Amino acid sequence: MNTIKLSDVTMKQAADGFSLSFKEKIELAKLLDKLGVSIIELEGIQNARIDSLRIKSIAAAVANSIVAVPVQLTAESPAQVWAAVQHAKAPRLQVCGAVSAVQMEYLYHKKPDAMQAAITATISACKAFCADVEFLADDATRADPAFLANTVKAAIAAGATTVTICDTAGSMMPAEFAQFIKGLYEAVPEMKTVNVGVSCCNTLSLADACAIASVAEGVTELKAAAYPIDTASIANLAKLLSARGDTFHANSSIQMTQLSRIMDRVCQICQAGKTKNPAIPAVQADTGIYLTSHDDIAAVTKVAEQLGYDLSEDDSIKVYEAFKRIAAKKEQVSSKELDAIIASAALQVPPTYKLDTFVITSGNTISSTAHIKLTKNDQPMEGVSIGDGPIDAAFVAIESITGCHYELDDFQLQSVTEGREAMGQTVVKLRSGGKVYSGKGISTDIVAAGIHAYLSALNKIVYEEEEV
């Protein structure tokens, strides 16, 4: 019985509909790996420093699945992507190229001969680094049949070990798509020497049916998503192969006993990414990790690492001393409280950006706006922005001033004192290059507390980047 490889594209296509944080992507990869997904596909590299670290981190977290990353049709891209994914247990490089006239012309601005040459050259370059190279024939069902066949032949000759046929339009019925795959096998006998996969768009809500129909024609790899995207469903395909796989003498590696539970967790992660404001993440739930006065510096440092911090030896000592003062007064110190301790004790730096003034306008019938004035080296700087709430508007205004955007990993707000004039404490965690930097702000005005916390974290990033 053939084992059909299910390739998850959730993270690769997430940017089209929702946003996942660095930690959410790692958790999602671990869940898919545990589920038994054969291949986990990631987004490619846009920002060399940040995206390379993301890929390296996910690759290290995946124990069994193939980790596939796309390369661009450029001379330098294969080496750059390989440097990021090479330490995965089973790395794969993907080369995607349009084969329909409309996509070649308008997306790649290439003529057929130039496109085919770029595809084969990139595959050859990838093959020099990685044994597992996949060619994705984008918009294959609308391509000229002769050009498609020649391009697939050339890709296999260049070293592609997997060829994926993409029904980007999603306009075919299952029987039509199966016949299309059968015809391509006849036109390109070389396809029998490599893995053949399909990717079906769900335009007509037939992606699952088309994918399963292609299995009967010899396809061994199906692209799908764990969270509803415009493609086939991992859960549906796994259930179909489990229930009726004997019809095609096929099964999958999915752990069916864990399917429902893991799919529920994946849905929670992705739904949160779909509904949250990209600039303001959902407040993180407590991790359930607690420390006591009996814990030593190694235990505290380990929990800090689990929270995403990379503390120096000096900062570890400072954090531990602050922790001991808190732990002496209470039975347990939660992970959220440790966040606040790190924000106030670790990596205290001279402020590059200082808050001068801020004006916030907000109401239930108008959009929130923020007018922020900062100083940098005694030079005034200001920005105005509209946001989804006063905090969001303030943070976006600061981004417009500094010209830098950092992933907001967490935003915490809690009361420090009671009463109408209660002091509010805010902890902001920013992620830069895979590292977490936290800042703390205290004020009777929660917006002011948030701005001070954001600037505190921002100044730590700027200081460290200038030191490098």
Image: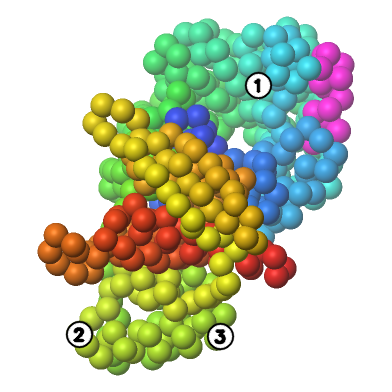
Callout 2 crowding tier (Cα within 10 Å): few <14, some 14–19, many ≥20: few
Furthest residue to the left? 419
- Tell me the element at label 1: strand
Picture layout, residue 177 above or below residue 157: above
The colour style of the image is: rainbow
Q: Earlier in the sequence, mark 1 or mark 3?
A: 1
- 112 magenta-colored: yes
Foreground tag (2 vs 1)? 2
> Percent position (x, y) of residue 332?
23, 81
Q: Earlier in the sequence, mark 3 or mark 2?
A: 3
Segment tinted magenta in the rendering: 110-123
In space, the residues marked 1 and 3 are separated at their CA atoms by: 50 Å
Q: Are marks 3 and 2 in contact (CB under 8 Å)?
A: no
Residue under circle 3? 313
Residue under circle 2? 331
* Amino acid bearing label 2: Glu
Residue under circle 1? 138
In space, the residues marked 2 and 1 are separated at their CA atoms by: 59 Å
* Amino acid bearing label 3: Glu
- Tell me the element at label 2: loop
Residue 105 in which image quadrant: top right
Measuring 33% from the left and 66% from the top, which residue is drawn there? 442
Picture layout, residue 260 above or below residue 302: above
